[in-house]
Amino acid sequence: MGEAAPLVDVWRGEMVESRHRGHAVIADARGQVIAAWGDPAAVIYPRSSCKMLQALPLLESGAGAGLSSERLALACASHKGAAIHVSRVAAWLAELGMGDADLRCGPQVPDDAPERHRLRDAGEAPCQLHNNCSGKHAGFLTLTRHLRAGSEYVEIGHPVQVAVRAAFEEMTGEASPVWAIDGCSAPNFACTVAGLATAAARMGDPSGLGATRGAAARALVDAMRAHPLLVSGVGGACSELMAAMGGRVAVKTGAEAVFLAILPERGLGVALKIEDGATRGSECAITALLARLGAIDPAAPAAARRMTPILPNRRGVPAARIAPNPALWEGGAAI
Amino acid sequence: MGEAAPLVDVWRGEMVESRHRGHAVIADARGQVIAAWGDPAAVIYPRSSCKMLQALPLLESGAGAGLSSERLALACASHKGAAIHVSRVAAWLAELGMGDADLRCGPQVPDDAPERHRLRDAGEAPCQLHNNCSGKHAGFLTLTRHLRAGSEYVEIGHPVQVAVRAAFEEMTGEASPVWAIDGCSAPNFACTVAGLATAAARMGDPSGLGATRGAAARALVDAMRAHPLLVSGVGGACSELMAAMGGRVAVKTGAEAVFLAILPERGLGVALKIEDGATRGSECAITALLARLGAIDPAAPAAARRMTPILPNRRGVPAARIAPNPALWEGGAAI
């Protein structure tokens, strides 16, 4: 695998104190690499950045016919476990005649502070509905029911995961060389950074896909852009960046510093992985690439907060700052 | 600056998902590099890893005469703001006729969960005593009083910081090329990784230092090893690693993934910096180097938890694990 390139610098005073390296690709729906940093052929786990790919079989099968765009957004979400998320996933499961016990994602302390404090004050334990992936799993359960398949829908041989793998490999254009168990217990299929960027481009420019897949891709990308708060939550990077771009671009983060962007108007997809897994690196880098593509105003608060944040110390002194490495502006092919 | 070397791998399934690169040096008190990874000449901010160096003037000046070893340990600490820390620093300041308002470190939400919950339940804001550096600052204030100097003891030209810089440069054997403001507002002087490792070796083998500095170094290193819980707190890496080594070795972490170890019995010092600033990387790497040096049993729970942790997912499945890169075992000179 080729070397990761410097993508993000953390400055303290006049010196770079820490640095995040990684791989990033801008591609089109034909799989052509428009610009790249590091190694486009680097193999990564996309983690939650590919939830919209994992949701394709839900719609293509017909299982998701009639699902609201809110629910489609939740199927693509890594949500904060706030009341707005938990209540909607609970209602979705209830309509299936199912509940928390049917999920296989495991419980998670919610990122959402009000809900976390409510649980603590009430002496309640977090449940599986609080898991950031519970919307994806509600989608898996909907497809499971449609297929009349068994209850263990996260097993690698389960019809749901067989369908997910097929869709993932077709969209990335690659046979996935390896898979592993994700934080939510679902299989996560590896691909190259270029393959992930290509899949992102195809989600936004489905002209080369069949009619069924094309409609599914459009519905999912539209749902993400229409409901940014359901995709993450108050203060979340995906929510704030999508809102700042006025719903023109869909973005999705993944654990261990993966980030993906879908630009339907440009017919482009972006995928990046920070080698060390740091979220501050992936958020800075994706924002910088969106700014480079003219998709976001780098001076917008939601962008500046991630691309060029000032890090005050405990007396409020601006002691450190994060900035994209100049290579993110100067490197890569012309676009 | 030379390239950072792979030091720590994060595995998921059969593939390395993320990787931490960095610079690490094992040196002796003469400044000889015994083993190195990455670039020994890499310039870093040592951050809190060098608090024992910053405390040397407190003792060398005579200002700290009569201070208990508990207070010396607190002067070297990045503590969790637990009751055991806050109460002792408060008592120390009270004996000086001073209090929270004399500190210049700024308030910090304590890492210690019981104290954090107590504050929330009582509706109290954290104060400067909770700052992980409040013990170091109590030492600065003790020296300030002794020198009859002004109240703004974190300013770069203040006699306390002038003395700290001199001690730091003498111990590292380098003129510090740049400084910056630390999280606690004190100046932090940069040095090379090799210089920091040399300073660590000299703290543990002060035979080449003068009598006054040698006594100060011994007192500080002995205090750290005698009171591991005061140096960090329950569950903290420094506390647990020092306890696991039976008080034979002093270790100290610093922000942005610096770690330092002082091995008096071997006359060696270790310093490392993970390039990306990730604590999971620095804790794994320092533990691996201590194991390589025979200072810690890698099977001891405190060591295994940091060197080879298994990362269960939200259903308790062991989905990922961290491990030292093989280069940490195979690379470097023979020792």
Image (cartoon, coloured by chain):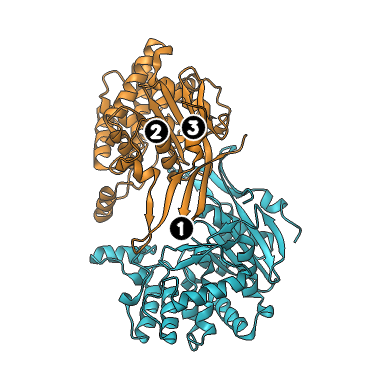
Chain colours: A cyan, B orange
Q: Earlier in the sequence, mark 2 or mark 3?
A: 3
Q: Is residue A76 above or below residue B210?
A: below
Q: Is residue A60 above or below residue A264?
A: below
Residue A110: % across, % down: 36, 64
Residue B99: % across, % down: 30, 35
Residue B88: % across, % down: 25, 34
Q: CA distance from mark 2 to mark 1?
A: 27 Å
Kind of residue at badge 1: Gly
> Numbered disc 1: what chain?
B
Residue linked to disc 2: B290
Q: Residues within 10 Å of mark 2 (few under 14, many from 20)?
A: many
Kind of residue at badge 3: Asn
Q: Which label sits on residue B201?
A: none
Q: Earlier in the sequence, mark 1 or mark 3?
A: 1
Which picture quadrant has residue A112?
A: bottom left
Q: CA distance from mark 2 to mark 3?
A: 26 Å
Whether label 1 touches label 3, CB < 8 Å: no
Residue linked to disc 1: B13
Q: Is residue A278 visible?
A: no
Q: Is residue B32 above or below residue A46?
A: above
- Judge left or right: residue B176 versus residue B124: right
Whether label 2 touches label 1, CB < 8 Å: no
Residue linked to disc 3: B188
Kind of residue at badge 2: Leu
Q: Is residue B170 above or below residue B192?
A: above
